[in-house]
Amino acid sequence: MSLTEKEIVSKCQRGETEYYEQLVNKYKRSAYFYALGMVGSVEDALDLSQEAFIRAYRSIKRFKPQYQFKNWFFRILTNLCISHLRKKRRRRVEVSTEDKEGRTMPLPDDHFNPHLLLEQKEIMRQLWKALSELGNKHREIILLRDFQGLSYKQISEILEIPVGTVMSRLHQARSRLRVKMADFM
Amino acid sequence: MSCEEFELLLNGYIDGELKDPDLKRVEEHLAGCPHCRKLVRDYQRLKEVTAEMKFKNPPQEIWDSYWQRIFHRITRGAGWVFFLVGAVAVAGFAVYEFATDPAVEALQKLIVFAIFVGLGLLLISVIWERVKASKTDKYKEIER
């Protein structure tokens, strides 16, 4: 007899590690693709998604059953991705070069490669580039809504913001995306 | 409803997240505003394009070994906790036995105690230096 997600979580909270595999298998793909959209690198997306599962397991006793595991897990994953991007940005600025006039030039970013896309259409390449140029807050909300298909309520739980803020932030994000995609629409 | 008000609710409308009375007000506004109807079409088109974007799937081996990597790290963490608790207990017991052993002279105990205190101080000094460096070292994120 198959267990419900709540029952699986409850078993994991009692230390029955073998049940955690079911949760990992259920969400590993969406976790990986979300992280890939956030950080734009296969290796980093794998590491971050796995790290998020490990952190979720280590703090699963603190998980409150009235929430959905997926929302709680995606909050952990989002925080990890944002923290990773901040560290990476600091590193790129610090390990920078100087141009002829002595101005500091950050190293070019080799992530968000168009070869990660399934279809190599020009419009998809442009969309991927436009997404990579959005701020982290705008990229995460587009990924959660349009790629993960989450409701505003779920997004508000993951990002810990009111539903009204989800709507306004999504509006800002899509408006910026629309401007960047203007030539392709 | 003004066009500015409509724009605030536009994304909720195209995502099907609006409920009455907002939904009714939006539909009434759209019926009489060609500018906002065009806006709706533009954003719906953007949503369609976004929904089409897919990433390549990594090789099957990655998915096959995905859980194993997590499982090893989870169980390794528990292993370290048990090891450290055991090691501290054994060390504490050994120190107690040595300190209370009547066959060992007080001078010998003092010398061994001095050696361990010295080692302890050196260890604390190294850890302290590392902690301080990690807070100020701007190259700490660089993989060597």
Image (cartoon, helix red, strand yellow):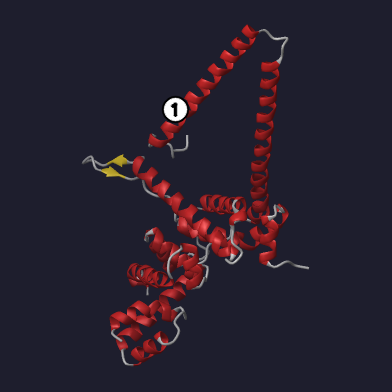
Residue labelled with disc 1: B129
Q: Mark 1 lies on which chain?
A: B
User: Mark 1: which amino acid?
Assistant: Glu
Q: In this view, does A61 lie to the left or right of B44?
A: right
Q: Name the residue located 70 percent from the left edge and 52 percent from the top edge.
A: A15
Number of dots carrying numbers:
1
Q: Measured from the top left, where is residue B45 in percent x and y? A: 42, 78
Q: Is residue A40 visible?
A: no
Judging depth in this view, the residue of A11 and A123 nearest the camera is A11
Seen from the viewer's position, the closer of residues A24 and B83 is B83
Residue A110 in the image: state x and y as whole percent. 42, 50
Can residue B46 be seen at all in this image of the molecule?
yes
Please name whichever residue, A75 or A89, is drawn nearer the observer in this view of the structure.
A75
Residue at the image position 37 percent from the left and 61 percent from the top: A134
Characterize the local packing of mark 1: few (<14), some (14-19) or many (20 or more) Cα atoms within 10 angstroms.
few
* Residue B124 on image: x %, y %: 50, 25
Depth order, front residue of A133/A142:
A142
In percent of width and height, residue A76 lies at: 52, 56
Label 1 SS: helix
**Compared with residue A81, is residue A184 higher up or lower down, i.e. above or below?**
below
Could you tell me which quadrant the N terminus of chain B lies in?
bottom left
